[in-house]
Image (cartoon, rainbow, N blue to C red):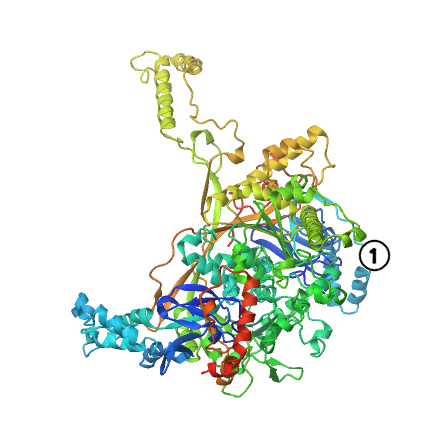
C-alpha cells in the first residue's frame, strides 16, 4: 500500500499542462518541473500521495521555496460555486434566451492587451504560484465580459494550465507507468501500445493472483500460483502480474513511518521474502536468487537476457538485483533455447567442476567468489530449466511480437489442466490466426485424423498425452494440438472517458488512436484418452443438434453450430 | 479449508465446488458429492444431468482439473417411476426417515458406464467462470467491468475493500482474489505475537436485502472464503460501514483502502466514507493510506449527483468512464461456386475470372443443348411425333462430356476443409453497449500540521546538496544510497535552521 512518498523511489508527477514525469525521489536533491519551477525533494518525502502541491516562494527570500498542499475545496472551487448557483448553469434573460452567447465574440487575438514581454516580466516577478499572472491576464482581456460562463471557464483553465506552479504526486504503479508509456509516442511501441484497461483484463483472464503463503503448499502438497509469461513489453506485463501477486513492491508494511529513518539499521533479513521469515533457521543464510517455490513468475525470453528494463521504476534492476526485492526470489527467467534444447545451452549443460572445501579455503578470495558465483549460476539455471520442463503451471500470459502459434505450441503443454491462457496483441490478425488454429472444425479434423492414424498403427487405447512422438504425421499436420485449449475467445475493451464538470457532462472530445489491442483467452484442458464415440459418425448427420456438436469440443467461437449466448 | 478459487488442489475434491463446462457460456456449478442427498433415485448416486448427457459425480471425483469427462449411461427413465413411491412416502412422515437411511447407507453406488456420446470438461473455479455461471439474483458485474474497477482502485494483495451491495456475488469473488495474500489463522486473530506480520487482504461486503445477504454468506462458506469475506446485512445509507462485533453493535472499522459502491444512490452512502465522520464515530477508511472509490451507476443523473457529493466530501481526481467491451467471432468465410451444397458458404463466383468462366460454360452448354435439338422449325407445335422428344436429350447428354465444365480458378483439392476459405472476424451478434458509468475518485490520507512538522524535521527541507542537483538516472542504486547517506550525514548538523515550514 502506498501510504506516503518514500525516499529513493520513483513517483509520477503530473504537471498543470497534463504531462507526466517519472521522478526518482532522491533525498537532498532538487526536483525540476521545467517551467513550473523546482522544489527540494525533501519537501515531499514522507508526505501523502494524490495531493496537489503548490510551489510558493518564501517571503523575503527569492532563492528558497516552500510547498503548500492545495486543499480539495480550492481545487474544486469553480465546480462547487457553479453547483451552488443552482441547477441552471446558463444565465437566461426574460425571454428565455441565454443572456450571453458567443454571437458577439470577436475572433481576434487583439483582445488580450498584455504583450508577450509584459507576461514574461510578470512571470519573473510572480510569487503567488502563478495565480497573480492569471488574474492579470484575465483583467487585461478586453472582451472578458462578453464571454459565456463556459468559455470563461475554459479560458481560465487554459491559462491555469500554462502558469500555475502546481504539481500532483501519484505513486508509481502499473497503471501510472502504462499511461505514461502511452502518452509518449516513442515509448508506446516499446510497451506494445498496451492500454491500462487491457492490463486489468489480462490479469483477470489469466487468473493471476497471490498464491498464498508457504503453509498452503504443505496442505496442497504442490507449489501454488506459478505463472508462465512471455513478455516483450519491456517488463510491463510482468510488472502487472507481480503487482497482482504482491511481488512488485518491497514489503512496505514492515517499514512503517516510525522506521523510516532507521531503515538501514533494520536487519536485512527482516525485509526479505516470506520464505525467509517462515523458516527462522535460514535467517542467517541469504535467499538464493529465483529460489521461491510458489507464487512465482517464470519469464521465457527470446534473447540471451530478458528485457525487463521497466522494472527499474519499481526498484528492481536485473543486472544488480536488490536482494530485498520480492522479485529477487520470485522471478525466474529462462530462454527458449534453455527450455527446448537445454543441452545446447552452455550454462545449463556444462557443470562447473566442484572443488572440495579444503582446496577452496586455500584459494584467493576473488577466485573463491568466482567459483561460488559459477556454481550458483549453474544450480540456478538447472533448477529453473528443470522446473519449467516439468510443467504443471497455473497460467500463461503472452504479450509477444513473435508468432503466437509457435509460442503456444511449446508453452501450452507446460500448463496444468484448467490453467488459463491469455495472449495480448496490439492488432487482431495474429489472434484470429490462433483462434482459427483452435477452431471446432480443426478439433474435429484432429480427432478424426488421430483415430485414423492410431487405427493404422494399431495404437488404439495405448495413447496418452505424450502421443506426439508416436504420431509424427499428426504433429506435422497440427503443430498445435487443437484439443488442448477450450473455449478460445477473442475480445477487446475500451474505456471512454467523460468530462464531468457541472452542467458540462459529455464524452471527451479526443482520445488516443493507434492500436486497438485485443486479447485471446482460453483454458488448457486434458482431452480424454481414446476418442469420443460419436465423432465422425456419418449416419448421425441428420440429428444435428446434440450428437453433431459432441463430435468436437463444444464452445469454440468459430463453429456455426455453436449457439452464442452473451 | 483452502478455497478452490484461490489455492486449488490439482483435482476435483469431495464437497468442493467444480464447474462443469458444457460449451462456452454454458457452465454449471456443482458441488462434488457422491451420495444423492435429495434422494432422486439414481443408481449411480449423485448425478448432474445436462443436455450433453448425464454425469454421475463418481466420474468427476478426483479427476484432474481440466479433464474431459465422458457422459455415462444413466437410467433417467425408470427413475421417475421408482421415485413416485418415495415421494408418497415423504408425505408420510413416519416412513421417510427409514427410507433415506437405507439410501444413504447404500455401500457403494452403482459403477457408472460410459455412454457412447456426450462429454464435458471439469474446470477449476475462477471468478470469471463463476461470474458466467452463477445463479443471478441481481444484475451482475461482468468481467470487463470488474477487471477495470479492481485495477483502477489499486486493489492488491493485502488490501481491504468495501463492497456494497453484494448482489449476486460476482464482484465479491473477483475482489477476494485480488486482495488474497494468505488465509487468516487462529494465531493471526490475537494481535500480539508478530507486530510485523503482513496485513491480510479482506473483503467487507454489505447487502441490504436479507435473503441475498444470506445467500452470499452461504456461498462464501461453501467456497472456502470465510475469514476473507465478511458479509454484513445492512442498509449502508443509514448505518454506514463499520463492522459488527460479536455482540452486534457497530464498532470496528474495516480500515478500507478501496470502496466499490454498486448502489442505486451512492451519494447517500458517501457521508459515512469520510476521514472524520460528523457523528464522531470511527472512520471506515484506513487512516494511513489514501482511499480509492468507484461507483457503478447505469444512469447519468446518478453520476451527476454522485460526483457533486464526492466534491463536497473533498474527494480528488474525480473521473468518469464508460467501458466498451466487445467479443469477437472468428470464422472462415467460404465464397466460391465449388462450395455448392455446403452450409453457410456463399455460392457465388469467387472472382471475376470464375464469373466469366462460369458464364462461358453456361453459354456453351445452352448452345450445345440447342444444337442437339432436332432442327425442326417449330418443335413446340409439332406434337405429332412424340418419339422425337424422348430421343432428343440423348445426343445432348453425350455431347456434354466434351464441353468444358466449370473448374474453379483456385483449387481447394489439397487444402483440408478446416483451412479453406478466408479467415474473417466480426463482433458477436449481441453486444452489451452499455453496462454502467464508472466514477472513480481518490481521498488522500489526512495530513495535519503536526504530521507536516514531524516530517519536516525528519527531512530538512532546505538542504540540497549542490552536487546532487538533478542527477540520478545514470547512477546505480548502490551509488545513490551511498550518496544519500553521505548527504544525510551532512544535513544532520544544520537541519534546524533549514526548516521553515
Pointer 1 local density, CA inside 10 Å: few below 14, some 14–19, many at least 20? few
Residue B391, compared with residue A33, is above or below; it is above
Location of residue A121 in the rendering, given as x and y in whole percent from the top left corner = 26, 73
Q: Disc 1 marks which residue? A: B107
Location of residue A157 in the rendering, given as x and y in whole percent from the top left corner = 31, 71
Can you say which quadrant of the picture contains the C terminus of chain B?
bottom left
Location of residue A75 in the rendering, given as x and y in whole percent from the top left corner = 38, 76
Viewer-proximal residue among B234 and A149: A149
Residue A134, compared with residue A562, is above or below; it is below
Q: Is residue A191 left or right of residue B22?
A: left
Q: Using the image, name the chain to which the residue with label 1 belongs.
A: B
Viewer-proximal residue among A212 and B477: B477
Q: Secondary structure at mark 1?
A: loop
Can you say which quadrant of the picture contains the N terminus of chain B?
bottom right
Location of residue B28 in the rendering, given as x and y in whole percent from the top left corner = 62, 56
Can residue A66 be seen in this snapshot? yes
Q: Residue at x 22, y 69 (%)?
A: A117
Amino acid at each position: 500500500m502506498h501510504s506516503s512518498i518514500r525516499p529513493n523511489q520513483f513517483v509520477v508527477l503530473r504537471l498543470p499542462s497534463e504531462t507526466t514525469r517519472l521522478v526518482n525521489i532522491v533525498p537532498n536533491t532538487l526536483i525540476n518541473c521545467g517551467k513550473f519551477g523546482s522544489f527540494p525533494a525533501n519537501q515531499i518525502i514522507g508526505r501523502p500521495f494524490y495531493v496537489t502541491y503548490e510551489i510558493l516562494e518564501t517571503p523575503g527570500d527569492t532563492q528558497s521555496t516552500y510547498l503548500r498542499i492545495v486543499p480539495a475545496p480550492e481545487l474544486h472551487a469553480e465546480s462547487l460555486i457553479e453547483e451552488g448557483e443552482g441547477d441552471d448553469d446558463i444565465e437566461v434573460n426574460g425571454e428565455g434566451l441565454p443572456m450571453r452567447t458567443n454571437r458577439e465574440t470577436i475572433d481576434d487575438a487583439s483582445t488580450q492587451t498584455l504583450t508577450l514581454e509584459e507576461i514574461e516580466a510578470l512571470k519573473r516577478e510572480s510569487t503567488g504560484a502563478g495565480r497573480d499572472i492569471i488574474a492579470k491576464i484575465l483583467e487585461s482581456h478586453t472582451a472578458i465580459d462578453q464571454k459565456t460562463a463556459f468559455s470563461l471557464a475554459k479560458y481560465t483553465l487554459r491559462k491555469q494550465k500554462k502558469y500555475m506552479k502546481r504539481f500532483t504526486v501519484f505513486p508509481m504503479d502499473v497503471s501510472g507507468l502504462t499511461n505514461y508509456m502511452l502518452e509518449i509516442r516513442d515509448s508506446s511501441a516499446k510497451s506494445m501500445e498496451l492500454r491500462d484497461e487491457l492490463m486489468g483484463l489480462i490479469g483477470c483472464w489469466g487468473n493471476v493472483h497471490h498464491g498464498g503463503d508457504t503453509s498452503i503448499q504443505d496442505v496442497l502438497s504442490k507449489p501454488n500460483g506459478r505463472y508462465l509469461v512471455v513478455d516483450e513489453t519491456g517488463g510491463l506485463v510482468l510488472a502487472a502480474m507481480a503487482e497482482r501477486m504482491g511481488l512488485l513492491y518491497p514489503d512496505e508494511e514492515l517499514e512503517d513511518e516510525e522506521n523510516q529513518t532507521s531503515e538501514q539499521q533494520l536487519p536485512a533479513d527482516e525485509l526479505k521474502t516470506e520464505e525467509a521469515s517462515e523458516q527462522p533457521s535460514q535467517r542467517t543464510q541469504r535467499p538464493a536468487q529465483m529460489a521461491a517455490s510458489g507464487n512465482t513468475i517464470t519469464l521465457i525470453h527470446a534473447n540471451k537476457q530478458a528485457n525487463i528494463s521497466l522494472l527499474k521504476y519499481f526498484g528492481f534492476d536485473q543486472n544488480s538485483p536488490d536482494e530485498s526485492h520480492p522479485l529477487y526470489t520470485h522471478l525466474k527467467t529462462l530462454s527458449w533455447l534453455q527450455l527446448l534444447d537445454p543441452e545446447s545451452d552452455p550454462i545449463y549443460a556444462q557443470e562447473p567442476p566442484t572443488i572440495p572445501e579444503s582446496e577452496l579455503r586455500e584459494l584467493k578470495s576473488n577466485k573463491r567468489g568466482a567459483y561460488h558465483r559459477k556454481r550458483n549460476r549453474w544450480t540456478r539455471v538447472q533448477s529453473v530449466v528443470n522446473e519449467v520442463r516439468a510443467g504443471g503451471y497455473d497460467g500463461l500470459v503472452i504479450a509477444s511480437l513473435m508468432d503466437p502459434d509457435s509460442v503456444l505450441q511449446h508453452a501450452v503443454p507446460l500448463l496444468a489442466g484448467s490453467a488459463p491462457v491469455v495472449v495480448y496483441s496490439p492488432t487482431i490478425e495474429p489472434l484470429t490466426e490462433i483462434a482459427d488454429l483452435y477452431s471446432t472444425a480443426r478439433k474435429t479434423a484432429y480427432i478424426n485424423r488421430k483415430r485414423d492414424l492410431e487405427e493404422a498403427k494399431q495404437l488404439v487405447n495405448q495413447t496418452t498425452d505424450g502421443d506426439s512422438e508416436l504420431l509424427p504425421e499428426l504433429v506435422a499436420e497440427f503443430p498445435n494440438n487443437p484439443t488442448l485449449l477450450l473455449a478460445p475467445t477473442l475480445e477487446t475493451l475500451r474505456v471512454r472517458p467523460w468530462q464531468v464538470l457541472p452542467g458540462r457532462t459529455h464524452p471527451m472530445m479526443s482520445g488516443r488512436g493507434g492500436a486497438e489491442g485485443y486479447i485471446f483467452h482460453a483454458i488448457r484442458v486434458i482431452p480424454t484418452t481414446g476418442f469420443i464415440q460419436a465423432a465422425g459418425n456419418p449416419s448421425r448427420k441428420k440429428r444435428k443438434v446434440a450428437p453433431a456438436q459432441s463430435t468436437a469440443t463444444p464452445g469454440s467461437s468459430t463453429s456455426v453450430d455453436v449457439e452464442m449466448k452473451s | 479449508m483452502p478455497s478452490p478459487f484461490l489455492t486449488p488442489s490439482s483435482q476435483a475434491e469431495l464437497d468442493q465446488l467444480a464447474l462443469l463446462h458444457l460449451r462456452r457460456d454454458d457452465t454449471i456449478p456443482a458441488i462434488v458429492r457422491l451420495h444423492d442427498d435429495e434422494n432422486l433415485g439414481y443408481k449411480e448416486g449423485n448425478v448432474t444431468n445436462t443436455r450433453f448427457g448425464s454425469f454421475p459425480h463418481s466420474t468427476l471425483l478426483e479427476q484432474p482439473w481440466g479433464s474431459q469427462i465422458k457422459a455415462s449411461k444413466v437410467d433417467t427413465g425408470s427413475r421417475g417411476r421408482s421415485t413416485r413411491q418415495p415421494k408418497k412416502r415423504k408425505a408420510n412422515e413416519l416412513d421417510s426417515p427409514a427410507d433415506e437411511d437405507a439410501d444413504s447407507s447404500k455401500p457403494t453406488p452403482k459403477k457408472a458406464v460410459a455412454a457412447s456420446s456426450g462429454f464435458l470438461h471439469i474446470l477449476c473455479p475462477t471468478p470469471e467462470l463463476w461470474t458466467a455461471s452463477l445463479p443471478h439474483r441481481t444484475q451482475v458485474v461482468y468481467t470487463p467491468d470488474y477487471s477495470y474497477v479492481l485495477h483502477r482502485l489499486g486493489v492488491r494483495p493485502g488490501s481491504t475493500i468495501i463492497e456494497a451491495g453484494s448482489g449476486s456475488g460476482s464482484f465479491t469473488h473477483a475482489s477476494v482474489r485480488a486482495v488474497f495474500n494468505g488465509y487468516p489463522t487462529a494465531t493471526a486473530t490475537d494481535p500480539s505475537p508478530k507486530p510485523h506480520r503482513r496485513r491480510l487482504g479482506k473483503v467487507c461486503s454489505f447487502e441490504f436485502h436479507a435473503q441475498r445477504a444470506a445467500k452470499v454468506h452461504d456461498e462464501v462458506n461453501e467456497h472456502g472464503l470465510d475469514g476473507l469475506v465478511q458479509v454484513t446485512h445492512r442498509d449502508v445509507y443509514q448505518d454506514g460501514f463499520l463492522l459488527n462485533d460479536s455482540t452486534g453493535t457497530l464498532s470496528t472499522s474495516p480500515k478500507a483502502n478501496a470502496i466499490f459502491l454498486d448502489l442505486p444512490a451512492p451519494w447517500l452512502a458517501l457521508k459515512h466514507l469520510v476521514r472524520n465522520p460528523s457523528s464522531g464515530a470511527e472512520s471506515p477508511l484506513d487512516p494511513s493510506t489514501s482511499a480509492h472509490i468507484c461507483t457503478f451507476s447505469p444512469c447519468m443523473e446518478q453520476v451527476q449527483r454522485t460526483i457533486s457529493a464526492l466534491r463536497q466530501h473533498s474527494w480528488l481526481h474525480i473521473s468518469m468512464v464508460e467501458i466498451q467491451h466487445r467479443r469477437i467471432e472468428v470464422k472462415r468465410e467460404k465464397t466460391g461456386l465449388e462450395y455448392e451444397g455446403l452450409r453457410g458458404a456463399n455460392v457465388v463466383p469467387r472472382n471475376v475470372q470464375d464469373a466469366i468462366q462460369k458464364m462461358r460454360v453456361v453459354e456453351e452448354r445452352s448452345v450445345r443443348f440447342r444444337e442437339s435439338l432436332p432442327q425442326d422449325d417449330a418443335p413446340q407445335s409439332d406434337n405429332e411425333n412424340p418419339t422425337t422428344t424422348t430421343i432428343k436429350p440423348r445426343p445432348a447428354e453425350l455431347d456434354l462430356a466434351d464441353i468444358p465444365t466449370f473448374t474453379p480458378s483456385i483449387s481447394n483439392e489439397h487444402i483440408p476443409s478446416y483451412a479453406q476459405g478466408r479467415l474473417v472476424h466480426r463482433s458477436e451478434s449481441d453486444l452489451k453497449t452499455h453496462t454502467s458509468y464508472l466514477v472513480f475518485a481518490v481521498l488522500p490520507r489526512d495530513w495535519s500540521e503536526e504530521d507536516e512538522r514531524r516530517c519536516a524535521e525528519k527531512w530538512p527541507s532546505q538542504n540540497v546538496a549542490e552536487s546532487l542537483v538533478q542527477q540520478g538516472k545514470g547512477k546505480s542504486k548502490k551509488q545513490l544510497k551511498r550518496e544519500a547517506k553521505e548527504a544525510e550525514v551532512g544535513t544532520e548538523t544544520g537541519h534546524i535552521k533549514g526548516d521553515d515550514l
